[in-house]
Amino acid sequence: MLDMNWFLGRLRRVYFMALPESEADYEKSRQRYIVGDSAAQTIAQLAGGTFLVSLMLSVGFSDAQAGVLTSVASLAALFQLFTMGRVSRLKKRKLFICLMTVQKLYLAVIFFIPLLPVSGGVSQLLVIAGYFVAQICSQIGAPATQDWLASLVPARVRGNYFARKDAICVFVTVTMMLFAGILMDATAGERQNIGFVINGGMILILVTLNAWAFSSMKEPRQAWMNDQGKEIHGKLKKKYPRQQEKQRGMLLKEVKEAFGKADFRMAFAVTLLWQTSYYCAAPFNTSYQLVELGMPFTFLMVISFLGNLLRIAITPFMGRMGDKYGMAFLFKYSLVGILLCFVCFSLAVPSNGYPMVILGTVCSALGWSFVGIGLFGVQLELLEEGKRDIHLSIISSLSGVYGFLVSLAAGWLLEFLQRAQITLSGKRIYAQQFTNIIGVWFLLITILYLKCKVQRRERQLDRF
């Protein structure tokens, strides 16, 4: 009994009493977040992209189906709508976030499914279920994690910190992916399942690291305070009913209130435009490189590694420029890199595939040096701080479902074009060339919206 009480007391101290008491605590927490996010981003890559597509193809999915299923993470964001009320009422969210992080273990499990003595249909169902459940948990915990990070990083240094974090995360991720890509190539063919097992084992280790890093962070959020200035937790809250704040409104009320704010609508519009351009093209480019262009894992991983070294080199500079000139300004120019990447893929065919993929990877690295930072930074600037977690949940869930529907429509278009076997001047036009062109057009619209709307609003906010 004493051991159990000690254990429960330790858990309470770690997950409910971890207030930062000094700037050193804040800095240590920011460093631990970099460790945790490096693991999280590596997990996302090892359980997505080329590796996930390879797993899906091995259990019988088609190119279009694999492309759509890799976008299922955005559909999982819908569940944020149904949980955001409860999550927002959690005065301490650290334990919840860590529990959601542990659920990424399902991403490791799906890579062991090809070893099971079951039919192809059952294997497909298990892959979908494991991937979807893991993505649901990850998406449910994302807004609370983002709000937690925002509370640890002062607004004046967000660009610099996010850039430094992104550079470290990318370096760790691409290094691990290069190693994993070499292993997947070495175990290709009849030994493919060995590669899947190794990949699953690496994900398992990274999930443990992710959960440990988040558990060792401090949480600035305070619970209810009594008259002595002490936090009230658990059953003690019943003794202080007047100290408890009123619960937030119901789902529809929160959504209606959010869309009543012009700044929220602007942040939502930017996210939708980006989702449209990205999900029209990006989910199908991996299978295009593997199948139609016939490129090996090792080549793709080496090119990705070298391209991301460039991304790592310029990301800190981009972060400083974001702090200096504004998030929307630099986000706009970083989207040009993604646009050029889509242009390269729209021109790529087997005869020129290698140079076009190399050039596209370089352009992608230049764009991604600030795209993620810029979009998140624009959202933080436009969203109301007091309800930031609620508004992030609404944006993430609605835009996530929208992104999935876009990828679904693009997948149907892809299958139609592949069946049509379109030719021009005797040369075959591949379906992915069309989807990349569509992505280019929507990126142009996004860039114009950032220039004409968001930047103007950003300058107004800076005056206050």
Image: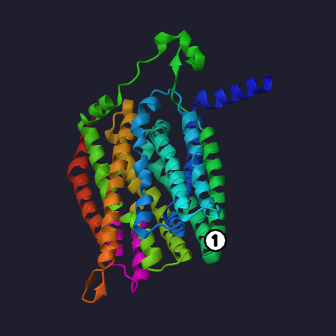
Residue 64 place in picture, x, y as percent: 40, 67
Residue positioned 79% across, 22% down in the render? 2
Question: Most extreme residue toward the bottom, as rendered?
Answer: 426
Q: Is residue 118 visible?
A: yes
**Badge 1, how many Cα within 10 Å: few under 14, some, many 20+?**
some
Magenta span main SS: helix
Viewer-nearest residue: 359 or 342: 342
Residue positioned 38% across, 62% down in the render? 367
Above or below, 270 against 335 in this view is above
Viewer-nearest residue: 104 or 10: 104
Secondary structure beneath dot 1 equals: helix
**Is residue 57 shown left or right of residue 425?**
right
Residue 238 place in picture, x, y as percent: 54, 12
Residue 118 place in picture, x, y as percent: 61, 61
**Is residue 443 shown left or right of residue 385?**
left
**Is residue 290 shown left or right of residue 446?**
right
Above or below, 47 against 34 in this view is below
Q: In the rendered view, how is the structure colored?
A: rainbow
Viewer-nearest residue: 86 or 421: 421
Q: Is residue 320 visible?
A: no
Locate the C terminus and report the quarter of the image it occupies: top left
Q: Which residue is mark 1?
A: 183
Q: Toward which corner of the image does residue 158 lie, by quadrant?
A: top left
Locate the N terminus and report the quarter of the image it occupies: top right
Above or below, 105 against 344 in this view is above
The stretch of residues the image draws in magenta is 337-366
Give yes or no for residue 404 being in the magenta stretch: no
